[in-house]
């Protein structure tokens, strides 16, 4: 049973019991109605208390019902709340821990609300591109006032119950309980007090106005426009709250319903819901059960105090886990530690970190030049130069000194993790932990699963990722893993576009308008064009058949590595990061075009976006087929959290589904016919071709 019914004297108690957060799925909704019916039929019952078992009053909609028929089957949440509204015996919500979304709307349908301090209260629907669809936009302004309610609805942010209770004139809570422990008893006592009071107060009957009316809503609309230009939901939140202030309750409810249904069908909401599900799914690995025992990680060693080693260390220091960094020279250690200090000090200056926390974190950091200092570490992450020989020396050392059962991880971005594992006598303990730069900031962590990596190692790293607030996605071993293997195809297309007539600025602008945080050329200048150059030199031997535009190499031959050399695809003024289109680069591109005998043509922004994005999609499909990624949502998570793919488009694989795989394949056929492109690459991956033919999507 997903809700329990019990009678205690004159009070009936309905306790939601649908772990983990008492989601309001169909069976829970039915059980609540049954409870109400029982209470009504029992003359001894004078009042009803609704509460939640375990760690929530209710977290709202049941995510297992997302996109399924059950979500819409009666009693629908709106019907349930109407039923509550019409009860002839008083209904008191006893609220604790978590009261969000539909859970808060349910509580607002009760006659009274008693809350425990510390309860997290929110209407977070906007984060899924929606608005509260069961009266939240109409009832919350009536109990909290228009401004507070609108802020909560537009931001989706959580507010603590005691903060809301302190708002003068608020009617959200009729009583604050002393604690979560005493909540139920206090709610029952309160129910007895009000048992005979009539008429029953209903939130829907409360007035709702804003003293500045028009001016306020205009202001709110402008604010929202600036903050959420790619999302339709926040503006609709303003509309619906305005309706609460201007229209009759039932009319406002009907308009809320319409707006909710319209938002449900927007690509933005579909993308955000996909992201929500994909994020949860990414931590699940098909053949690693969720109850797999994990190894304990209490101390971490990091090898290499360079760009990545420092950032990686900060993640663990932030989570309160002691770190020992090892280097070859004292100067390198000093430089690394100084960078970590500088990063923290910048946070302190900005008021994002207290001096005390900064000191606590630094106190967890030790440095060493000797492997001996790592012999008790539970996890050791290598972040030395990207050369197999250097990695070999490090892993052989680690094999000698690390304690049995310690996890040995490599942050390599391109090398074969299986080869690295084979440098040790314990390949089952070796795993790739591919952080992204800056490693203390970027959310993504690619967890690279070698062919011998033990399941408990994977489970441990996935759990640890959560602790250090990363989005972890499992990748198999291949050149570039998921993210960089795909970005290579994207970069190749960017190069071909230059050869055919586009400028770096045009390509960047087109893809940035599509929503990428940064186009490929500005990105190259930021990361350093020499990195890709080195990789291409290596690949020229390994994959000589791969066709590339030569412009990127020519750029590097000019010494234009990017921002760090003051010139790359763009010019830069000293100390500034503004990308200024470069005459030298444009001439270099034109000269190369002539060498190739290509007559430049005008390329549309649409073609630019399609070639860049569909290149990701096709390679993504190969990656799925090869089993490098477990599911298409994992690929989307990689792109959303590590590569600046626009969130509201849901990642490349989801986006392909939005465009329609049929259309993607048709476009690819056009691109394949372009003699200056790579016809071979544009053959749709078999998986893509099959799904397109069947009219299906990746997910
Ligand atoms: P880096 O050159 O900034 O730092 C490497 C550090 O390792 C240097 O401080 C060096 O002194 C130290 N080192 C070299 N050999 C060593 C050894 N035998 N023992 C101890 N320390 C040694 O390089 P970066 O950028 O931090 O890269 C490190 C690793 O992370 C590479 O495998 C790279 O492919 C990978 N990576 C780099 C990313 C980036 O954006 N820079 C992103 C993701 C991965």
Image: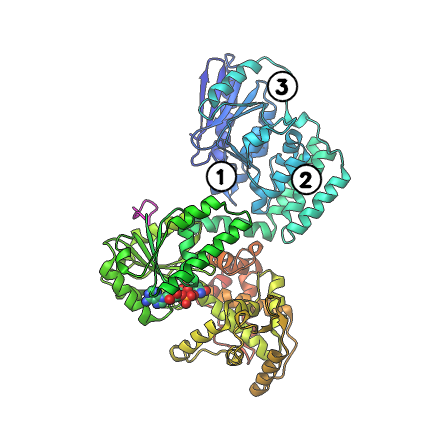
Mark 2 or 1, closer to the camera:
2
> Is residue 95 shown left or right of residue 242?
left
Which quadrant is the N terminus positioned in? top left
Q: Sequence-wise, which precedes: disc 2 or disc 1? A: 1
Sort mark 3 into few (<14), some (14-19) or many (20+) by Cα contacts within 10 Å.
some
> Is residue 591 shown left or right of residue 336?
right
Question: Does the rendering let one see residue 533?
Answer: yes
Q: CA distance from mark 1 to mark 3?
A: 30 Å
| SS of the residue under disc 3 | loop
Which stretch did the figure color magenta?
288-297
> Is residue 248 shown left or right of residue 624?
right
Q: Main secondary structure of the magenta part?
A: loop
Please tell me the numbered disc located at residue 455: none
| SS of the residue under disc 1 | loop
| SS of the residue under disc 2 | helix
- 189 is higher (above) or lower (below) than 108: above
Percent from the top left, x then y, of residue 513?
63, 62
The residue nearer to you, when weighing 450 against 2, is: 450
Q: Which residue is mark 3?
A: 200
Percent from the top left, x then y, of residue 451?
30, 62
Label 2 lies in ligand 1 vicinity (Cβ under 8 Å)? no
The number of callouts visible is 3
Q: Which residue is mark 2?
A: 240
In the rendered structure, does residue 527 fall within the stretch colored magenta? no
Q: CA distance from mark 2 to mark 1?
A: 24 Å
The residue nearer to you, when weighing 410 against 373, is: 373
Sort mark 1 into few (<14), some (14-19) or many (20+) by Cα contacts within 10 Å.
many
Q: Which residue is mark 1?
A: 62
In the rendered structure, does residue 294 fall within the stretch colored magenta? yes
Label 3 lies in ligand 1 vicinity (Cβ under 8 Å)? no
């Amino acid at each position: 049973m997903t809700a329990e019914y019990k009678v205690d004297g004159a009070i009936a108690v309905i306790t939601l019991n649908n772990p983990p957060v008492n989601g309001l799925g169909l069976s829970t909704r039915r059980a609540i109605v049954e409870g109400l019916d029982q209470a009504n039929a029992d003359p001894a019952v004078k009042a009803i208390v609704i509460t939640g078992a375990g760690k929530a009053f209710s977290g709202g909609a049941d995510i297992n019902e997302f996109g399924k028929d059950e979500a819409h089957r009666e009693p629908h949440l709106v019907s349930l709340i109407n039923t509550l509204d019409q009860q002839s015996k008083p209904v008191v919500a006893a609220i604790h821990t978590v009261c969000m979304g539909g859970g808060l709307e349910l509580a607002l349908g009760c006659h009274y609300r008693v809350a425990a301090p510390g309860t997290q209260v929110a209407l977070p629907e906007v984060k899924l591109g929606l608005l509260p669809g069961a009266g939240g936009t109409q009832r919350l302004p009536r109990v909290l006032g228009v401004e507070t309610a609108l802020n909560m609805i537009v931001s989706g942010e959580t507010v603590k119950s005691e903060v809301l209770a302190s708002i003068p004139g608020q009617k959200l809570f009729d009583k604050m309980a002393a604690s979560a422990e005493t909540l139920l008893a206090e709610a029952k006592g309160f129910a007895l007090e009000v048992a005979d009071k009539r008429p029953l107060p209903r939130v829907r009957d409360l007035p709702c106005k804003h003293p500045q009316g028009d001016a306020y809503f205009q202001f709110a609309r402008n604010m929202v426009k600036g903050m959420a230009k790619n999302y339709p939901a926040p503006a609709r939140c303003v509309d619906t709250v305005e309706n609460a202030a201007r229209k009759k309750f039932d009319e406002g409810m009907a308009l809320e319903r319409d707006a909710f249904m319209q938002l449900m069908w927007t690509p933005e909401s579909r993308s955000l819901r996909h992201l929500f599900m994909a994020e949860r799914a990414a931590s699940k690995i098909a053949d690693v059960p969720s109850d797999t025992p994990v190894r304990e990680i209490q101390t971490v060693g990091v090898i290499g105090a360079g760009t990545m080693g420092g950032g990686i260390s900060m993640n663990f220091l932030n989570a309160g886990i002691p770190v020992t960094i090892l280097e070859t020279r004292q100067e390198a250690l000093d430089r690394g530690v100084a960078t970590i200090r500088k990063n923290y000090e910048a946070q302190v200056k900005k008021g994002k970190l207290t001096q005390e926390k900064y000191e606590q974190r630094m106190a967890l950091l030790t440095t060493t030049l000797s492997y001996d200092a790592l012999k008790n570490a539970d996890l050791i992450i290598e972040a030395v130069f990207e050369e197999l020989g250097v990695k070999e020396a490090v892993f052989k050392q680690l094999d000698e000194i690390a304690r049995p059962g310690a996890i040995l991880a490599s942050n390599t971005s391109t090398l074969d993790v299986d080869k690295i594992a084979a440098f040790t006598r314990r390949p089952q303990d070796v795993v790739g932990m591919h952080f992204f730069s800056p490693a203390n900031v970027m959310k993504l962590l690619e967890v690279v699963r070698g062919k011998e990596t033990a399941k408990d190692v994977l489970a441990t790293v996935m759990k640890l990722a959560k602790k250090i607030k990363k989005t972890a996605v499992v990748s198999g071993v291949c050149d570039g893993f998921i993210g960089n293997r795909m970005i290579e195809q994207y970069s190749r297309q960017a190069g071909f576009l230059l050869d055919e007539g586009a400028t770096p600025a045009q390509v960047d602008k087109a893809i940035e308008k599509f929503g990428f945080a940064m186009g490929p050329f500005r990105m190259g200048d930021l990361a350093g064009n020499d990195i890709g150059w080195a990789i291409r030199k290596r690949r020229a031997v390994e994959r000589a058949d791969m066709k590339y535009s030569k412009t990127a190499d020519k750029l590097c031959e000019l010494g234009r590595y990017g921002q760090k050399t003051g010139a790359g695809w763009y010019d830069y003024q000293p100390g500034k990061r503004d990308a200024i289109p470069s005459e030298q680069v444009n001439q270099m591109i034109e000269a190369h075009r002539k060498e190739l005998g290509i007559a430049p043509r005008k390329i549309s922004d649409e073609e630019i976006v399609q070639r860049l994005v569909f290149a990701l999609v096709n390679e993504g499909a190969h990656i799925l087929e090869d089993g490098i990624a477990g599911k298409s949502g994992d690929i989307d998570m990689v792109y959303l959290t590590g590569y600046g793919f626009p969130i509201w488009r849901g990642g490349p694989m989801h986006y392909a589904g939005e465009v329609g795989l049929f259309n993607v394949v048709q476009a690819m056929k056009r691109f394949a016919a372009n003699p200056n492109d790579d016809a071979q690459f544009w053959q749709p991956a078999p998986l893509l071709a099959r799904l397109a033919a069947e009219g299906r999507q990746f997910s």
